[in-house]
Amino acid sequence: MSHTTPTYDELSGQWTRLHRLGHLQSIAGWDQAANMPPKGNEARAAALAEMAALLHRMRTDARLPGQLERAEQEPLSEPQRANLREMRREWRAANALPEALVQRQQLATSRCEHAWRTQRPANDWAGFLENFREVLRTGREEATLLSAESGLRKYDALMDRYEPGMTCAQLDRVFGEVRQWLPGLVRQVQGKQSREPVIEPVGPFPQAAQRALCEAVMRQLGFDFEAGRLDVSTHPFCGGVPEDVRMTTRFREDEFLSSLMGTIHETGHGRYEQNLPREWLGQPLAYARSMALHESQSLSFEMQLGSHPGFVGRIAPLVAQAFGDQAAFAPGNLHRLITRVKPGLIRVDADEVTYAAHIILRYEIERPLIEGEIEPEDVPALWDAKMMELLGVDTRGNFKDGPMQDVHWPEALFGYFPCYSLGAMYAAQWFATMRRAMPDLGARIAGGDLAAVFDWLREQIWSQGSRWTTDELARRASGETLNPAHWRAHLESRYLA
């Protein structure tokens, strides 16, 4: 312990303990989704609720305010000050919530998510509602308390947990503009693609071959299998800790692209986690800056890189190797398959162009739901209306591919959805910046030289952790804060040029 910064060092030790317990919590959560037998759920829910309460108790320790004040007065380095700022952020958010609510929410979400796994395939909206009402009740309580503490409006206060500094006012402006031009772009692209023949691949695609293909592509993308693994779950996700990243995907034998592209997406998350600043591991400074930045990494991998004709050319032989040679696996055709724009029901399977419509729809339902303007019973009708308006898709009576399609609502992840579209916008901004610095980027990707992309991301994003605010990080990396114009330009050049 340093003689000059004793209080800061003490806080640093407390946060290392939080990180280690959080490590166990995340592995137990991953196991619940990937491995646990069904009868283990009640016991696991109780154990996770206990752990959530313990971590909450540590973050709300009565000594912390005094320690944070004293540490401010110590002679800290600039990164230490940033670390202290992030500790204070965590402390403030935790202190706004009573332990009883944290435990109640953990139990409600464990129950709702577990039941959702069987209710979703059964299209059982009425059954889902019974559990979801309690999840929403805890989400609204949380929003009210965080709002009272921060002075932010309720939805902003929830969003602030994932995307510090982002507000509904900003989102309404960004999404409002996208709403103006996106439906027209979708129609234009579909018109263009209707004149471009595409050969459909012939299945079945055995699960073992899909898994081998996914792992081969993960290796090409630099995922470290000594510090992580790939498993199967109902809903693909990336969890664990930087030292032990747990990724999941899901397979269908009748098609392989959703598992392949889903795995490429999760690999972007995984590489961000694996490359966070090791010298700060266990401290808030080593956490990912925000979820839009996290999604900017998964979407840099899936959309910018994974859907790039040069990259598709590199993986086409791996696809043919996995499933046998077919005309559908020729590089040009495979690229047409991957970039096919077709409004559909499922967000995670959506193409790059229609994806944002799914996010805008969630935001436009979730915000009034949290702020008490609508009730859960109102969701299906709103869903149907907005799907028709934004994508021209009829979803009436289809709950499993409608409001029940994602794990986010059962798990009370309210305020998260906007991060996906913001992530796509940041990803386009990062690649626009890279192309300015490296005009031959496309040729490098086609030649299999991905190091240029990974080196830039490591230097500008991964290694920075939470040292800067999101706006400052974006400015340092690309010379400007979020600018959605890059994303629109990317879509127009890839799909209409």
Image: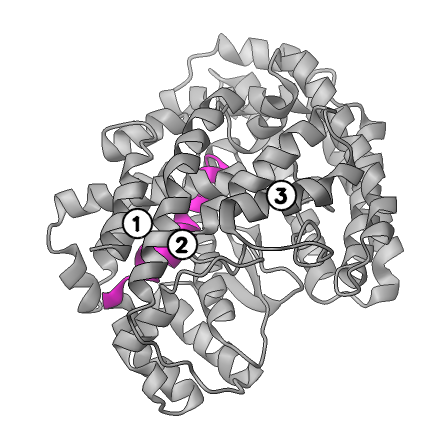
The numbered disc on residue 385 is 3
Residue at 14% x, 62% y: name it.
443
The quadrant in which residue 143 appears is: top right
Q: Nearer the viewer, mark 2 or mark 3?
A: 3
Determine the CA span between mark 3 and mark 1: 26 Å
Q: Residues within 10 Å of mark 1 (few under 14, many from 20)?
A: some
**Within 10 Å of the Cα at label 3, are there few (<14), some (14-19), or many (20+) other Cα atoms?**
some
Type of colouring: one colour
Element at label 2: loop
Q: Is residue 339 covered in magenta?
A: no
Q: Secondary structure at mark 3?
A: helix
- Disc 2 and disc 3 in contact, CB within 8 angstroms: no
Please name the amino acid that badge 1 sits on.
Leu
Picture coordinates of residue 294 (x, y %)? 46, 44
Q: Quadrant of the C terminus?
A: bottom left
Callout 1: helix, strand or loop? helix
Cα distance between the residues tagged 1 and 2: 8 Å
- Please rate how many residues cluster around mark 2, counting C-alpha atoms within 10 Å: few if below 14, some from 14 to 19, many from 20: many
**486 in relation to 12, above or below:** below
Q: Nearer the viewer, mark 3 or mark 1?
A: 3
Residue bounds of the magenta highlight: 288-310
Q: Give x and y (percent) for residue 296.
A: 40, 45
Q: Is 334 displayed left or right of 60 in the figure?
A: left
First in sequence, mark 1 or 2: give its number.
2
Instruction: Relative to 246, say whether 52 is above or below.
Output: above
Give the amino acid at mark 3: Ala
Mark 2 lies on residue: 352
Residue 347 on image: x %, y %: 55, 54
Residue 413 picture location, percent across and down: 66, 40
Does residue 14 appear to the left or right of 142 in the view shown?
Answer: left
